[in-house]
Amino acid sequence: NFGLFATPERNLVFDLNDFDETLPAPWEWDLKRLAVSFAVAGRDNQLPDADCRRGVLECVRAYREHLREYSRMNPLEVWYTRLDMTTLIAMAPDEKVKKMREQLAEKARQRVVENLFPKIVGEVAG
């Protein structure tokens, strides 16, 4: 439900990319879906159950804290809040995670270029 996107200024940001669930429903459903996504991602990456649980708890804690922070902002401040790729890379807990995030950023940049210039990229690759 999340991914890297290029802003009009060509900055990579981490944001929502799944808008298929747009009908009115209790907010708790979104939080439950988010928590389950973290658990599934952990299992898919073959992490131990204890690590998956910690990841889910950290996700829910961060959700709660950011919701509290956003409740003190005006709508325009919330709208322009971004988590850019440079910040995500800088926040990496170790070199392995930093390298992985740098690789993800490079793949995202390539997708942006391919979407903007599909004919040129195809000619260069061919």
Image (cartoon, rainbow, N blue to C red):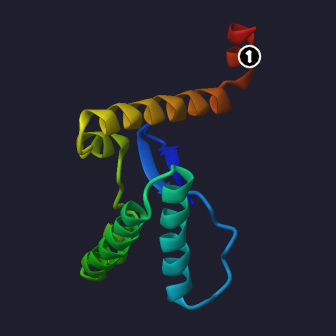
Residue at 42% of width from left, 63% of height from top?
52
Say few, some or many: other residues with alpha carbon within 10 Å of mark 1 (under 14 / 14 to 19 / 20 or more). few
Kind of residue at badge 1: Gly
Q: Give me the residue at 50% from left, 87% from top.
A: 28
In the foreground, 91 or 85: 91
The quadrant the N terminus occupies is bottom right
User: Which residue is pictured at 75% across the width and 19% down the height?
Assistant: 119
Q: Is residue 22 left or right of residue 47?
A: right
Percent of width and height locating residue 62: 31, 70
Asked if residue 108 is positioned above or below residue 56 in the image, the reply reads above
Q: Quadrant of residue 11?
A: top left
Residue occupying the point 59% across, 27% down: 113
Asked if residue 9 lies left or right of residue 30, the reply is: left
Circle 1 sits on which residue? Answer: 122
Question: Residue 51's image quarter?
Answer: bottom left
**Residue 115 in picture, x, y percent from top left:** 66, 33
Identify the element where label 1 is drawn: helix
In the displayed structure, would residue 36 be above or below residue 4?
Answer: below
